[in-house]
Image (tube, rainbow, N blue to C red):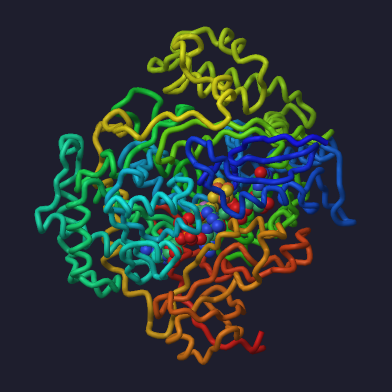
Amino acid sequence: MSKSTALRICPLCEATCGLELDFAGREVQSIRGDRSDIFSEGFLCPKGLALEELDADPDRLREPMIRDEGGWRAASWDEAFEDIERNLTRIISEHGRDAVGLYLGNPSVHNTALMVYIPALRNVLRTQNVFTASSVDQIPKQLVVGLMFGSGLSVPVPDIDRCQHLVILGANPLVSNGSLLTAPNIGKRLKRLRQRGGKIVVIDPCRTKTARAADEHHFIQPGTDAFLLFGIVHTLFEENLASLGRLEPLTAGLEQVKDLAKAFSPESVSARCGIDAQIIRTMAREIAAAEGAAVYGRIGTCTQSFGTLASWLPEVIHVLTGNLDREGGAMFPLAAHGPSNTKGASGSGRGLRTGRWTSRVRGCPEIFGELPVSCLSEEILTPGPGQIRAMLTVAGNPVLSTPGSDRVSAALDSLDYMVSMDIYLNETTRHANVILPGLSPLESSHYDLVFSQLAIHNSARYSPPMFDAPEGQWSEWESLLRLVGVFSGMGPRANTKTIDDDVMLKLIQREVKTETSSLHGRDPNEILEALQPRLGPDRVVDFMLRAGPYGDGFGAKTDGLSLDVLRDKPHGIDLGPLRPRVPEILRTPSGKIELAPALVVDDVARLQKTAPSTNGQDLLLIGRRDLRSNNSWMHNVECLATDDRRCTLHMNPEDAGRAGLEESQLAAVTSRVGSIDVCVEITGDIRPGVVSIPHGWGHDSPHVKLDVANNHAGVNSNELADQDIIDVPSGNAVLCGIPVTVTPAADGQQ
Ligand SMILES: Nc1nc2c(c(=O)[nH]1)N[C@H]1C(S)=C(S)[C@@H](COP(=O)(O)OP(=O)(O)OC[C@H]3O[C@@H](n4cnc5c(=O)[nH]c(N)nc54)[C@H](O)[C@@H]3O)O[C@H]1N2
Ligand SMILES: Nc1nc2c(c(=O)[nH]1)N[C@H]1C(S)=C(S)[C@@H](COP(=O)(O)OP(=O)(O)OC[C@H]3O[C@@H](n4cnc5c(=O)[nH]c(N)nc54)[C@H](O)[C@@H]3O)O[C@H]1N2
Ligand code: SF4
Ligand SMILES: [Mo]
């Protein structure tokens, strides 16, 4: 069979690398980085290479599965949807729409079909019980930027290709390949930053791979970044280093921030964060002096007790030092598909409204239409009106990924009914009654609707499907449209083509009604016609691109962008470096950057009141990632499962000595809510008083169909994470800085 080559964007992480795949027939023969990709320059990581095995994995589900008395069995699509319709319609008619909970996992933002059609599902499901992986991840950052700039997607990204000074807190991009920072081949970009005379400072409780590649690394006590960052803000004011430049007249709340920072001199915060006062002062001076500086915080600063404050202060520092919206500072991308921060009148808007409803049991406010996933199991397990009785999970594994896993598992077990859209029978989907599989990434088209909005360079890239979907197998957008049919009372066999047309038409109608749109006043049917013959996600993406800021406006602009134009450029279209977007990007009611939003400022008192988190005996547990994993999944791909010593307890020699633990010994790690036994790995790269275990492991359940992962099971660190402890303003889970005790395990040597 003759060999062909296809180009694809890797959908597995936020780096969005361009790949080149050789294949013959239905078989992938080799994968390499696409050197001509306009953004990723030929880079790829071991996970990109593993796409081949992921595609071929025999455990990957290819047919709907139904669980009945006899266990799991394959079912036809019609049978699966009939089962779903019968059960969910009954539950909704007896208990109302809030009785159905929805959990959306991380791969749903990497999957174009899910990104495009989940909004349609949410519109018809109309439940208040929506949970996503965002509340074990980045919601503090989105809350902060929503309040400051008016849209939760207006996340400033460090302009690392032009930056001269980069502070990285709580992120390890040389391993994670970046997050809320789409910058493929980030290692090389950081190297170039240093080569042009720039400086990188890493703040982390561990000497990570990124820390080793930086100019400076400082160990920090977990959960105390807000103290350090306030110390920097204090210094900027005290030493007259604050200089807002162009943004001064566009900024509100400066005096309030100055007042708040008075209480946080470097000398007073130093003992809390474990970083010397002189180092904090130097950090402030260097950020202020650099020709372009950015402060970048990620998982370590979001998933901690003060996630909101630690996500807000970097933006405050950007504004105070004139680095927001400046080349080489922190800038706003302009994505081609026209995301929310390009919609409506530019310069001001409705701003972010939160708390439109609250969770039933704990009263946590809704943010971006969702509730904290730390509340999920209590919403299922607590009887009363509004109790969740059925769940729909989409591309998520909350049993391994969210706090209090044992309780999450028990909660899912107690449901009347559960449906999962997933490609594996795993720790979460094993609780479902029906699993609806998706296609292989190689059988789907791909356009990054999220990460092009978080990229350090504006570009557009599209991958058509490489292989046809196997006979009789549905794509996920077809499944979602069937579910839309079910929730809108059309029955289990509604015509998905009609629903798809309806979804498309509604999007067009909204656009033509918007005065500020390039399509204002146009005839919706003419536009629908112009999108033919595409269907599904490709049609929606084509529409978004053509209506977007670089688009052809359906004939309005001769050399504008469309999916046809993009398809003819398989290495992508370069839309140029990031350009200043303030004030155009602002959507706050005041039309200003809100430097001191009330919701954030109110949390400063909690920071000041909090006692140091250790009692002298406890250690603080944090997490870590390794290059060959992807949260809780991809552990079933043999070529990534090469080393069995990945899910270990990292422990400093001092702490290990004190606990009487030796290398490779089994330790019992116990928190307020759980205890697990895990193998010790002693390393001087972790701060004394801190231990780490990676998340996403614990594949030892006999009920899953993950043959490779079963053999490299590891333990589930989220059994130790406490559902009751959240970052208060955002409701985000606290996964870093969990107090634990560590002792030799009862059964000793491993
Ligand atoms: N302790 C601790 N916990 C953490 C973190 C941490 O740092 N420490 N990190 C958190 C973070 S950042 C995140 S994002 C979450 C992730 O939390 P989740 O999103 O809940 O978990 P994942 O491990 O990403 O699980 C993804 C699921 O999607 C399925 N899947 C993969 N591809 C597809 C697809 O194309 N279609 C469908 N339908 N399904 C697919 C997989 O089989 C798997 O079941 O975990 C969080 N949990
Ligand atoms: N290989 C691989 N890549 C991935 C993933 C994966 O699972 N594996 N997951 C993807 C996902 S969903 C995400 S969200 C991103 C996350 O991307 P990153 O944010 O880069 O995630 P981590 O590598 O976990 O880095 C978090 C760092 O925070 C440090 N830390 C912990 N607590 C604190 C603290 O209190 N303060 C400070 N300053 N630091 C702290 C940890 O030691 C760790 O080095 O990675 C993505 N990429
Ligand atoms: S870095 Fe991310 S996008 Fe690039 S090949 Fe690896 S998994 Fe894929
Ligand atoms: Mo994440």
Foreground pick, 49 / 240: 49
Residue 323, by quadrant, is top left
Q: Which residue is painted at 77% across and 48% down in the image? A: 56
Count of labels in the image: 0
Residue 674, by quadrant, is bottom right
Please say whether residue 383 is visible from this viewpoint: no
Foreground pick, 312 / 713: 713
Please say whether residue 643 is visible from this viewpoint: yes
- Above/below status of 225 relative to 312: below
Task: Give the side of residue 403 with respect to residue 30, left or right.
Answer: left
Foreground pick, 54 / 353: 54
Residue 446 place in picture, x, y as percent = 61, 34
Residue 119, by quadrant, is top right
Residue 233 place in picture, x, y as percent = 20, 56
Q: Which residue is painted at 40% across and 41% down in the image? A: 456
Q: Which residue is painted at 75% across and 59% down in the image? A: 706
Q: Which quarter of the image is occupied by the N terminus?
A: top right
Q: Which quarter of the image is occupied by the C terminus?
A: bottom right
Q: Which residue is painted at 46% across and 41% down in the image? A: 368
Residue 380 place in picture, x, y as percent = 62, 55
Task: Give the side of residue 726 with respect to residue 2, left or right.
Answer: left
Residue 277 place in picture, x, y as percent = 20, 70
Instruction: Residue at the far right: name it.
Output: 70
Foreground pick, 206 / 520: 206
Task: Give the side of residue 246 with respect to residue 150, left or right.
Answer: left
